[in-house]
Image: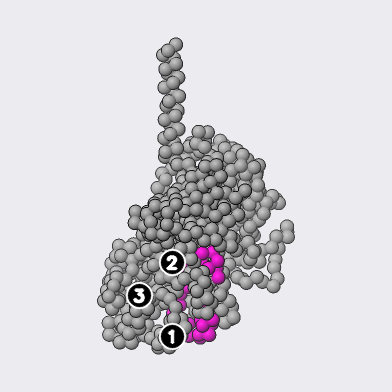
Amino acid sequence: MKRKTTIILLFAALIVVVAVAVFASHPSSSDNLLLLVPDGTNFSDARVQVWVDAGKEEGLHIIPVHDSDFLRPIYGHSRCAGLIFPDSIHKQASDLVVSSIKQFVAKGGNLLLVYDAGTLSSEGRYALGNSRLSDLAGVKYALYDDLRENLIRWSALKTSNKIVQDFDVPPGKYYPFQAPATVTTDSSGQTFDVQFRRYQFEDLKYPNFVTSGDYSGKELFHSDAGVAAGEHSYGKGFVLFVNLPIGYLTTITDGLPLHMFLKYFAEHRLALPYLMSVPDGTGGLVLNWHIDSNAAIEPLQEMESWSLLDQGPYSVHVTAGPDAVAIGDKMGVDVEHNQDIKGLIKKYIAQGFTIGSHGGWIHNYFAAHIETDSPESMQQFLVLNKAALEKEAGRPVVEYSAPNGDQPLWVTRWLEAHGFIAYYFTGDSGMGPTEVYRDGNRAGSNIWAFPTLHLDRAAAFEEFPREGYSDAEVGAWLDSVTNFVSDHRVVRLVYFHPPGILRYHSIIDRWMEQTARLKTTGQFRWYTMTEMANFLNSRKSVNWKVSQKDRVITVDAQHPVSLEHLTWWFPADKFLRPEANGEATVLQTATGWIVIAGRVKHLQITARMAS
């Protein structure tokens, strides 16, 4: 009898040990978003890390969890903020996993359900009729029996001007960015008056499962396939259904959809506190100048009298060689010998601007050969450009922009290996600074891409008239993107070539009046790529967690050097005024609280939930 009792006690102790191990390996926190992945999947898999990295960039905690851990009752699902069932990596799922997810939501859980997650059984078959998760999605989809090869349709992503404001999407990425006089509606009467666009092209088309039947919730995005995204209640819980492969898209340089749905889920649906991506919670712009030939020198001299030069700092990138189109044409900037450009560079440095490298020595030649010639033969041009600018600037050059936007993956790797920390990027358009994924993997460890903003098809100023945008629309776009970064407290990049900006002098002056006004009130800043990249790399070193007791949450943050300028956001509709135990500034905004850390290594912030 004693032996039997001992065995039972040992077994019970083993369960406790296992439970402790589970919680130790998967820390539970009131703000954690669990990312469900199949058993046997390595958490370092890029299809997992793309979500984890997106969470870090958005200031959220995404914790990968294997199916078997999620299925254990001892895991404690209720102690997480929500569950993500991701596309691509979790296309197959057992009936047990599907039913457990439904129970999780029905009991009050929050779910982000993405595209093809769980559309196949463990044996790799589509369910009869429609997806087993159609009731969670709120609409029938994955209609394999009826549609077969027409199961998925590529079409434009449409939404309303009102809804897009909640998704951190900058004007111009959706178009028209001003509310149109006339709007179109679907069969339910829902308004869809804007579409997503891409730089140099028009409609941006995405794959969607064709949906069938009425949607039971609020449709957020629509396509020709049906419901592209929507939200609705399920039992006591909530589901945000995204009918787009947002995880996969991020791995091929279209990360905006993942970031915008993730941020919406966390901020607008779950009201989670988050670590902001800008210093002191102040949004702003990077203005990136591309100087690629001696045709830019006279425009630069003309611009010296502009109000543009009274502000900044800006990121000024130069192609430094004596040639521009072909070897020997003498059409280049010629930094080593041209006294005019030498004087301008010295002036820019004195004003606090950052000098960066624009490609490799001979602008057009480099752009024309970068994809066809060997990396070994092209690296010499990168070396020459960097060396010439560093000699003139008297400091390391750590910013880069690719001529014609053409940047093969080997260039990014070369840049990071040679001390660069930031580069202009034509992929991932609409996003803020991001650590890019390309060809399925992350391109670099501590180097940040700065995607360019665009006005529908155009981004550089010389492109606006060529593409038919009026001066009034260009001015309205500059006004809108400035208000966007100020209101959303984020950073975005705008770029130009000096010859192309000349015709917009009066519009630039009005723009400078707006930015100066917002800067005076502390609502806007100009940033350089270097400043933001250094901040974001330092931000990666912060270790912070959220705990909850009763109706009070505590943010505990530590940094090996300093937390200074790091900022946390608390939505006002969920939290009363936060209090900081340590040097910090607490400010109230129209929609929330921001807590800005001072020059300390450790900070605790407590916030009581509103009744």
Viewer can see residue 61: no
Is the residue marked by circle 1 packed among few (<14), some (14-19), or many (20+) residues within 10 Å?
A: some
Q: Where is residue 329, by image quadrant?
A: bottom left
Mark 2 or 3: the one toward you: 3
Please give the name of the residue rendered at 67% of the width and 54% of the height, measured from the top-left corner.
218
Q: Locate the N terminus and report the quarter of the image it occupies.
A: top left
Q: CA distance from mark 2 to mark 3?
A: 16 Å
Residue picked out by circle 2: 450
Location of residue 44 with respect to 483 vertically, above or below:
above
What amino acid is labelled 2 in the image? Phe
Residue picked out by circle 1: 303
Mark number for residue 519? Answer: none
Q: Where is residue 438, by image quadrant?
A: bottom left
Given residues 470 and 303, the one toward you in this image is 303
Q: CA distance from mark 3 to mark 1?
A: 17 Å
Location of residue 300 with respect to 238 vertically, above or below:
below
Mark number for residue 355? Answer: 3
Q: Is residue 493 rendered to the left or right of residue 391?
A: right
Q: Secondary structure at mark 2?
A: strand
Q: Is residue 311 rendered to the left or right of residue 384?
A: right
Give how far across and how far down residue 239 sits, in percent. Answer: 61, 48
